Image (tube, rainbow, N blue to C red):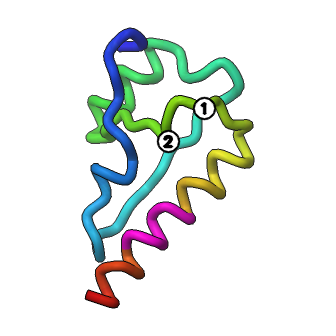
Amino acid sequence: MKDEPRKLLSHEVKPGTAVRVLIGPEGDFSPEEVSLAIQQGYVPVSLGEQRLRTETAALASVHTIHIINELQVSE
């Protein structure tokens, strides 16, 4: 799973839908954790090529989802 390219969060979020984001620990999720999350319906995504600290990734995720929802409202 680690070698497979992940889809960008911004391409996977649908405006107006409920979203739950799991932020990986430093060093990322283990393959077992990824497999379990996928079994539970989570979709592996990325915020881009840069590596972010855990707390920064959480803020970036929430902001990305907020912007997607704001753009939907203004259209």
Q: Is residue 46 left or right of residue 57?
A: left
Q: Quadrant of the C terminus?
A: bottom left
- Residue 67 part of the magenta-drawn span: yes
Around disc 1, counting alpha carbons within 10 Å, would you say few (fewer than 14), some (14 to 19), or many (20 or more)? few
Range of residues picked out in magenta: 63-68
Q: Distance between the residues labelled 1 and 2?
A: 8 Å
Give the x, y percent position of residue 31.
Answer: 45, 12
Give the x, y percent position of residue 20.
Answer: 43, 56
Give the x, y percent position of residue 67.
Answer: 46, 72
Q: Mark 2 sits on what residue?
A: 47
User: Where on the picture, by quarter, is residue 39?
Assistant: top left
Give the x, y percent position of residue 70.
Answer: 41, 81
Mark 1 touches mark 2? (CB < 8 Å):
yes
Q: What residue is rendered at 71% in x and 48% in y?
A: 56
- Residue 11 part of the magenta-drawn span: no
* Kind of element beneath mark 2: loop
Q: In this view, does 1 lie to the left or right of 66?
A: left
Q: Mark 1 sits on what residue?
A: 50
The amino acid type of the residue labelled 2 equals: Leu
Residue 49 vertical position relative to residue 16 in the rendered view, above or below: above
Q: In this view, does 26 lie to the left or right of 74?
A: right
The amino acid type of the residue labelled 1 equals: Gln
